[in-house]
Amino acid sequence: MSENALRDLNTIPGSERRNESSNKASIAKHVVSNTNGNLEEGQTKHSVNGVEVVNTGAEVGISEVEYIESENLNDLEDVDSSLKTLLSGLDSKDWVLVCEALNNVRRLALFHRESVLDVLGDVISLVAKSLKNPRSAVCKTACMTSADIFSAYNDLIIESLDPLLVQLLLKSSQDKRFVCEAAEKALVSMTTWVSPLLLLPKLQPYLKNRNPRIRAKASMCFCRSVPRLKIHWVLLDRKAVLPRAWDDIGVEGIKAYGIDKLIQTAASQLSDQLPESREAARGLLLELQTVYQKFDDLSSMAVSEHPEMGSWEKFCQSKLSPLSAQAVLRVTNISREGLVIGS
């Protein structure tokens, strides 16, 4: 640009410059407001959870997404049509269609459980794919879908669990807060509805994961699932009814999995990097100590096989290294006295 041109530009009155800026602002406002009026050619309108979304072809604008809780979901109007488009919707490049398909999975799981059984493995794989989607709306909806899948299909998902599990552990520890909370709810649903005898071996490898946050979340899931080994669940209308007292509960699950393996796992988490892992391990050890000391059949079984293991202290010393046994006994003994244990 020549010096004369620059000089002319600098001599433009301030009022004219202000008018030019206001014109640009008016254009911007017109473009924004136009999405709320009549749709231009090439635009499409979708609905996510009852919210209308305008798709201009290049970008999708959405002001708010309503996340519907499971108890507020309505049944599908056309089940057969939804089933036909289910997998293609979950695998769509249009994130709005993916959200719609995820919510249809939830409705099918709640109202038409058997209809999805033939494609359940494929559905779970695509839900896991949605958990990796960069859009938070898709991630949260996928987390909510995971929770409903766990509650509907229980142990039937165990063979397809791995890709879903690793993504939920990641999302619950290192994503936006509202996504983390939804992922955490899904993990709670998993430990509630999936048999611990099947779930604990799946969780075991993640207790040694290189990512400390994944280790911590896996440890919390592991420790939350272990108490269910000793509980006889009664399923009535898909709701878990717990016995009123421990005296009504057997220890067959503890025997089947092995209390020695559980103690070794908990002891290894006592020295973990994150406090969440250490706190979960402390809670599990106190639980196991109570089980060991309260039920005569479990302690009698241990004593009959190894007479030297009559007390909790001797049992720990026989199953753990000296340092690990010392750490476990310090936690259980001092905690029983009501003192606070430092990290």
Image: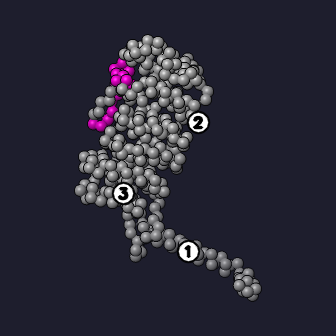
The amino acid on which the numbered mark 1 sits, given as a three-letter code, is: Ser
Q: Give the residue at x 48% y 30%.
A: 265
* Contact, mark 2 vs mark 1 (Cβ under 8 Å): no
Mark pair 2, 1: CA separation: 55 Å
Q: Give the residue at x 39% y 13%.
A: 304
Between 237 and 95, the one lying in front of the other is 95
Mark 2 or mark 3: which comes first in sequence?
A: 3
Quadrant assignment for the N terminus: bottom right
Task: Locate residue 226 relative to residue 31 in the image: left or right.
Answer: left
Determine if the magenta segment contains residue 241: yes
Between 42 and 65, the one lying in front of the other is 42
Within 10 Å of the Cα at label 2, are there few (<14), some (14-19), or many (20+) other Cα atoms?
Answer: few
Residue 229 seen in this snapshot: yes
Within 10 Å of the Cα at label 1, are there few (<14), some (14-19), or many (20+) other Cα atoms?
Answer: few
Dividing the picture into quadrants, the one containing residue 54 is: bottom left
Q: Give the residue at x 41% y 50%.
A: 128
Q: Which residues are magenta?
A: 237-255
Residue 281 percent location from the top left of the image: 51, 29
The numbered mark at residue 26 is 1
The amino acid on which the numbered mark 2 sits, given as a three-letter code, is: Gln
Q: Give the residue at x 33% y 60%.
A: 88
Mark 2 or mark 1: which comes first in sequence?
A: 1
User: Which residue carries the number 2 mark?
Assistant: 273
Quadrant assignment for the C terminus: top right
In front of the other: label 2 or label 3? 2
